[in-house]
Amino acid sequence: MDTAWSRADSAVLGTITWPARRATGARWETSAPSGRESRVKDGRATGDKRAVLFAARSQNALHRLLDTLPVFAGDDRVHRCFTLVPGSAFSLDALSAIDRAGGRTVPWAEAVEQTFALILAASPKGDLHALHGPRVLLPHGAGFNKSVPGEGTEDSASGLDPAHLLRPDGAPLATRYLFSHPSQIARLAPLSPSVAARSTVVGDPLLERFLESQDRRDRYRATLRTGARTLVVLLSTWGPESLIGRRPGLPAELAAALPHDEYQIALVLHPNERARRGTLDLAEYLDPARQAGLILPAAHEEWASVAVAADLLITDHGSAALYPAALDRPLLGAYDGGRELLPDSPMSALLTGVPHLPGTDTASHLATAVRAHRPGSSRTLAAPAFAEQGRALDRLRETLYDLLDLTPPDRPVLPRLLPDPAPAPLAPAAFAVRIEYDDQGSPRVLRHPAHLVPPAPAHHLSAEVGTAHRRFTQSAALLHRRAGEHPGAWTEPAGEWTLRTLADHPGGHRTAAIVLSPTHCLLRARSGPLLSVRLGPGDGAHRAAPVDPVAVLSAVHAALLAGRGDPGTPLVCSVGPHKVVAHLAPATAEEAALPV
């Protein structure tokens, strides 16, 4: 008899179906769709319906539980419901997450009065022992790397602490404890032999989603509009020792230091950090970086898609980094020591084995880290956290269906592919532009968001008319707009727009330009005629130039200002990793009359 669940020792296992139910003493009997009632014989339900309760204490724990859903996919014998385990400072956000997932919720007060066929949880904290039915406990992260000061046993891994894994009477809290690697059970065995005896290695369901989705990397990057830029993803756990807790200005610092056409930045925040700050405070804190194009993916699923798309990840001691490491992504450590990281944990080994993010010369160090990455090195560092790779959901289904006393469906269980991430909702409308020249005199364009402090003096300012702040358009040397940006707006001929824009912004060596398409622009310097600018690749390939044409217009503006932008002479410039050829010619009457 299982001592891990009190009243369920003698009560019904798995007799709830929804919506019809009636209480019969200490157990529930329910009406099956055929009108039959599930009956109990020798402590086992003889009906073919099972109610599975997903018990979540926090948003992060809920996300872990949602990753197990494919195990029950398509099985009408299983009825899924959710309850919120009280006692967490982040419980309200967990309830909102259940609602977003569309889960049917059972109030805690009702849940503790019922008996379930199976209870799944991803956190041992709270009054989980008050629920009736066999309990299965999954990890709420990867690797058991942290000790949370003030909680449970001092210096014990959160999630492996016997203070939480046992009931108040000292009996095991769960019927089964599931782990992702045998080493985790080995760490647990000296601390609590009774818990270790109930433990099983099934692998990590979230890692299965990473592995299954890795071929979607190009798709995710296209959705994020990354192009050939280096996507740098910051991974921050929660609390005072987190990346954001210790270096809150890092997202804006990177956005200021890294050329916009060479790098893209994303920030992955732990759900607890989002809950602690709140939506408004978080948005205000990150506003400078978000105005520069920072990607802030959603806490559930989307962050993982962004991690798959990454070229380089910067991480603190949070376990999220182990997942992209398992895909062999390059990593930089940004944890400067503290009380939380456990010395013999997988994250400790990972942070010891990867380069560290310096405080200065960030851009060149990031580029070096990507180039210096040794294939297979990150995957090796992540290996101690994950076993049963590619088989985790099969192992999980075997375990759960055995507890449900059901035969699993006769079809493979497939991980859910990670969804397409949303692109950054904001992009810089004004840039401080530097122009550098190589030995052949070809310009290289380096653009930095104008609202942040650039790393070096700028050659000129470029601003999008009608989008950028007025303070930038008043100072910009290159004023531009994108045709068709505002459908239904009043239009005028392109040639007239350039003349009017220059007249509206008197003084200085200004240039007005219109982006007609990714490869065709019109441009007029204050003292010059209207020019047509056609863009093509600088390597001779027959394909569109994969760059923002406004960056090339900055190179044309600089060339005209220096007296080197002669029509008929191709201008070769570098934007990010690409070389682009700009072909200048006098604009035709048809081009000048195009409505914009």
Image (spheres, grey):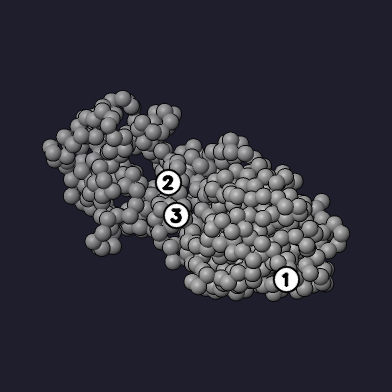
Viewer-nearest of labels 1 and 2? 1
Foreground pick, 508 / 265:
265
* Residue at mark 2: 447
Write down the quadrant of residue 287 in the picture.
Answer: top right
**Mark 1 and mark 3 in contact (Cβ < 8 Å)?**
no
| Residue located at (78% from left, 63% from top) | 9
| Residue located at (50% from left, 48% from top) | 295
* Residue at mark 3: 420
Q: Which of marks 2 and 3 is nearer the N terminus?
A: 3
29 relative position to 582: left or right: right
Looking at the rendered image, the quarter that the N terminus falls into is bottom right
**Farthest residue, direction front:** 35
- Decide: is 381 above or below 561: below
Question: What amino acid type should be assigned to the residue bearing mark 2?
Answer: Arg
Foreground pick, 321 / 198:
198
Check residue 199 in the rendering and tell me which mark sits there, or answer none.
1
595 relative position to 293: left or right: left
> Secondary structure beneath disc 3?
loop
The location of residue 475, given as percent across then percent down, is 40, 31
> What's the distance in space between the residues labelled 2 and 3, CA to CA?
28 Å
- Decide: is 517 above or below 379: above
> Secondary structure beneath disc 1?
strand
69 relative position to 494: left or right: right
Mark 3, other Cα within 10 Å: few <14 / some 14–19 / many ≥20: some
Question: What amino acid type should be assigned to the residue bearing mark 3?
Answer: Asp
> What's the distance in space between the residues labelled 3 and 1, CA to CA?
35 Å
- Asked if residue 222 shows in the view, the reply is yes
> Secondary structure beneath disc 2?
strand
Q: Earlier in the sequence, mark 1 or mark 2?
A: 1
The location of residue 413, given as percent across then percent down, is 51, 69
Question: What amino acid type should be assigned to the residue bearing mark 1?
Answer: Ser
Mark 1, other Cα within 10 Å: few <14 / some 14–19 / many ≥20: many
